[in-house]
Image: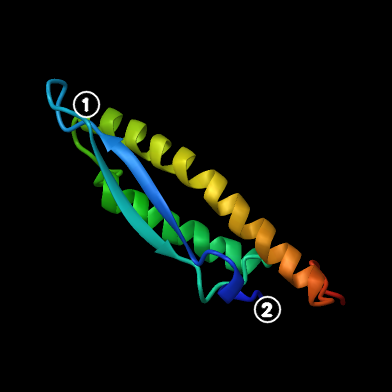
Amino acid sequence: MFDHRSTAAALLLAAGMMLAPSAQAQTQRITVDSRNLDLASDAGRAVMAQRVTHAVDRICGSPHARSTSEQHNYAACAQAARADAAPQIEALVAAAENARKMAGGSATPVR
């Protein structure tokens, strides 16, 4: 399993939210914990994706907005948050895969 003591255990999601066309954009950050996940596995990455989706919804509001402008704001916010998180997730996954290889484990299960 992935040794979390030597690698960052969380990622920060940030997105500029536009509350209204005349409002100033503000940045919000949420920490998404990955300490208990094996990001070298498909299952661990799937749980991480769910956590990121929940964090995006906390930052950006409901994906089921009623007005067109709310839908547009959510889409823009979610895209920015996911773009901000992607390199961090990729780095965590790469570190987990490298740790597994260093420990002599296989990145794919043997049947």
**3D distance between C-alphas at marks 1 and 2:** 44 Å
Q: Is residue 10 left or right of residue 41?
A: left
Q: Position of residue 45 (x, y in %)?
A: 59, 62
- Mark 1 against mark 2, which lies toward the viewer? 2
Q: Quadrant of residue 46?
A: bottom right
Q: How many residues crowd mark 1 within 10 Å: few (<14), some (14–19), many (20+)?
A: few
Earlier sequence position, callout 1 versus callout 2: 2
Percent of width and height locating residue 73: 27, 31
Figure check: 30 above or below 79: below
- Between residue 73 and residue 98, name the one nearer to us: 98
Is 2 positioned to the left or the right of 48 in the image? right
Picture disc at residue 16: none
Snapshot colouring: rainbow
Farthest front residue in view:
6
Q: Is residue 45 left or right of residue 32?
A: right
Which residue corresponds to the image point at 55% horizontal and 53% vertical from the top-left? 89
Q: Are marks 1 and 2 in contact (CB under 8 Å)?
A: no
Outermost residue, right side: 111
Q: Position of residue 2 (x, y in %)?
A: 65, 74
The label shown at residue 69 is 1
Residue on which the image places disc 2: 1
Tell me what residue is drawn at x 61 percent, y 53 percent: 91
Whole-percent x, y for residue 13 in the image: 39, 49
Identify the amino acid type marked 2: Met
Left or right: 109, with 99 as reference point: right
**Could you say whether the residue bearing mark 2 is in a helix, strand or loop?**
loop
